[in-house]
Image (tube, rainbow, N blue to C red):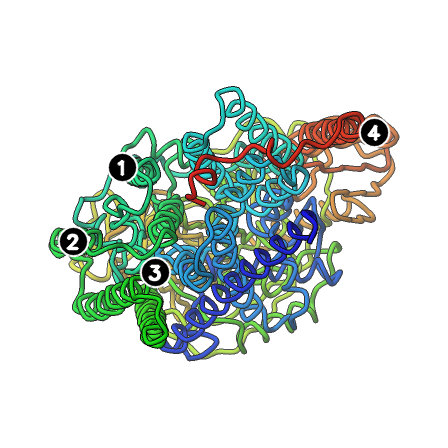
Amino acid sequence: MSRSTLSKAVSGGRFRTRGAAALLAAVLTTAVFCVADAAARSYPFGPRTRDVNDLGNQYVPFHAHLWDLLHGKADGGLFINWQSGFGSSFLPDLGTYLSSPFALLVGVFPRHEIDLAVYVITVLKTATAGAAMAWLLLSLRSGRWWAAGLLGASYGLCGWSVAVASYNPMWLDGLIALPLFCLVGEWTLRRRRPLLGMLVVTEAWIANFYTAYMATLAAGLVLLLRLWLSDLSRRQRLRAAGRAAATVALGVGLAAPLVTVIYFGTKHAYPGRVVHFTPVSTEDLLARLLPTTYTFGSPALYAGTAALLLALALPFHRAVPVRVRVAWTALVVAVTLSLQWEPTHLVWHAFATPQGSPYRQAFVLCGLVVVAAWHALSYGPPDWRALGAATGLLALITAVASRSALVQHLTWVVLSLAVVGALGGLVLLRLADTASDTTARRGLRTAFTVLAVALLFGGQFGEAMATFADASRQRLRHMDNYAPWGQRQERQSELIAQTDDWPAYRTDAGREQTVANDPMLVGGQGAQYYSSLTSDVLSRTLTALGGGWTSRGRSLQSLDNAVTDAIFSIGARVHSPPDPHQDWFPRDGTAPTVSREAVPPLVTVRPSAAAAGGFGESPYRNQELLLGSRVYTVPPITLRDDSGQPVQGGQVGSGSAAKRPVITARCPAGSQAYLWAPRFSGTARLGGDTARFRSLYPRNRAAMEPLGQVPSSGRLRITLTPNRPGLVPDGALGCLDTERLRSAVDHLKATGATRVTVSDGTIHAELPAGSKGTAVVAAPRIAGWRCAAGGGDAQPAKEFHGLIAVPLDGESTSLTCTFRPPGLRLGTVVGAASLLTLALLGVLTAVRRRRTPEPSSSATIRPRERVSGAL
């Protein structure tokens, strides 16, 4: 047999072995994922929703919007999402939440099965991560394929995956990226697959740049370790490091058109709260290494008891070369310590402490623990000394962790069974390997191996399933949760579809939201919008107008107000009862309805002087400023407690404010009363009408609410029922003169655009002849808009109190505004330069290969581990 034929045979055998391990990891991961959800009675295997926190509020609606885009049914395109936030930049959201290739699978599911689509995508991502790790392990060093498969599944089902990423599915792309990046590092060491390596980096950074950044750092550390362990010369090591750096630079450069857009999107986003990192206690840190421990604020480090035991045994495993033991142990310890030290914590998180879970890099340590475990097992099962030392360390970890409140009774049961399975399996595997190779002993050795596999498999399956199911149940107890698509959303969607006539007017999904991104989920075009990239100008404008929000200003709510409906051209509005899945307020059981109003067009014309001044404290006066007419009476109010005594400072819900404080005031008879109390939580009743407020300062802000019509006497008596301490400000009450509003609307309709067309990132309006002053587009003036009146040159759009404005000269009868996301041009230039560099390198490489004879196999550079038998 020739050398080339032998090489191909060996290569084919390795490929099949790695494929078998990857398949085992994927199947085992999928099985545990589904069985655990069935055990927890979680969707789609039970009645409990899995739409907790941002999964229900953000990710499912964003995937629904992607479905609409793929099927040509969305309002907007890649540049602008016209359904949310009165027109939001969509490309940064796409790159943050939807750019994974897995997300495209949503298009093959029915629209009403959007929750199932996201679930299937999540399972597939998790299984792919396990498969990628199994493939990497056998690429680092040959060994038992089934063991690589089990450890790959341990990684896919690590604590970070099941406790954090399972409801943040875009982060799972980072879980996949880590083993793939390490594999790219192996290719650079061996001068193999340079183009494929760059494409892997590009795809991972496009899929989710945030976790890809963390995976890049981790893979860089692994590559440095591999270089240190190799027998390469200093010059060869530098060249290998240079190849790896070039691979990453070109790969990220190719992803730049999306990455730069996301970067600039964060620069223009509403600022979140500043969070200062505080490390968790040692007992909590160690507790998260154990199964069935859960908390939102500590690192989820569980990677399976078998993997943990093997990693603990590595320093004492005498069959493993000393340098390998020291290197991998030191790397695991160093990364563990980096989780707890603020400077390195900031490095892992791109120099900004996250507002949510503070240990988003924990998957890196889980991966390193699994790789260390593989190095301990691939040299042969640990000997008795190593197993004894590992068991002792595990006992010490457990003793310290037992002082943590995170350890529950279930933990001890699951941990005990997992230790029996893992330790028993490793002992039997050791006995099988040390048994003599005689005919009589071969059957015993096979029996030991089969029993060992059964124990390791059963222990891992059981503890992973219990950990996953427990995390699913605990999330429901600790986080907000939302019902999957059902009858409520179906009815809302039908009403909107029957009423919608965009861009003639907007149809709002309603103040009584089901999730924070209702317009993307059920349709329409409203203020509601929740994203990490919610623009600063949108949030501040809606807040000034009396709007409410959660997530400290990044989750904006609809505002049920006749004036803002006129300002933003909302001609139809859905009114639904409170979501029965939530228990914030009593359920009234009414069916959703739609109200219609005559509103101005999307583009109106204002006098230039109207743009003078800025927003003040009163949302009623701010609304009038945007409308261009005085329509409110803002009377002085009197706030008294149950005993009739004045309430000092407007504080209600605590102390002497009693249970039912009362607001009294006088307004014109027949006007519409509104209450603005952003820091009040509870209900407000005027006659037979009740308004609901929900505020939890500083996280939540209650929106202005309509109270009903002012009685003929003009006297108002509003009864408040607070459910927590809050505040009612001066100027809280506003009474709207509906006749004045109607006159203002008629004027704006008469002077506004005669025709408006809207595409993805373009607005075109036809104006009446002789229009002077300022044309105002009822959309937030986010960065990226450029406008031109008539045939003039496009200029950066002006701003009219937060909205897009275009100066008019009295001669132009049309205007056109176009939007391009900030950073797209820069990213395109960087991407094109990277592509050109890649093409030039390809040409140079091809020329060099034609001029240079192939090196002999003995001249191939190999890592020291390969030479010494470590691989």
Q: Which one is in front, 338 or 767?
A: 338
Q: Name the residue under label 3.
A: 479
Q: Name the residue under label 4.
A: 810
> What's the residue type where badge 3 is placed?
Met
Tell me which numbered mark, 2 or 4, is placed earlier along the sequence. 2
Single out the mark in the foreground, 3 or 2: 2
> What's the residue type where badge 4 is placed?
Gly
Residue 26's place in the image compared with 206, above or below, is below
Residue at 58% over, 68% down: 117
Tell me which numbered mark, 3 or 1, is placed earlier along the sequence. 1
Q: Where is residue 518 drawn, in percent x and y?
A: 55, 61
Give the label on residue 401, or none.
2
Q: Mark 1 points at which residue?
A: 337
Within 10 Å of disc 4 (Cα), the crowding (few <14, some 14-19, many 20+) is: few
Question: Can residue 431 be seen in the rendering of this structure?
Answer: yes
What is the C-alpha distance between the residues marked 1 and 2?
Answer: 17 Å
Q: Are marks 1 and 4 in contact (CB under 8 Å)?
A: no
Tell me which numbered mark, 3 or 2, is placed earlier along the sequence. 2
Q: Where is residue 427 drawn, in percent x and y?
A: 25, 64
Q: Do the residues labelled 3 and 2 touch (CB within 8 Å)?
A: no
Within 10 Å of disc 2 (Cα), the crowding (few <14, some 14-19, many 20+) is: many
Question: Can residue 585 be seen in the rendering of this structure?
Answer: no
What is the C-alpha distance between the residues marked 3 and 1?
Answer: 29 Å
Q: Tag 1's secondary structure?
A: helix
795 left or right, relative to 732: right
What is the C-alpha distance between the residues marked 2 and 4?
Answer: 75 Å
What is the C-alpha distance between the residues marked 3 and 2?
Answer: 25 Å
Q: Which one is in front, 14 or 795?
A: 14
What is the C-alpha distance between the residues marked 3 and 4?
Answer: 56 Å
Q: Are marks 3 and 4 in contact (CB under 8 Å)?
A: no
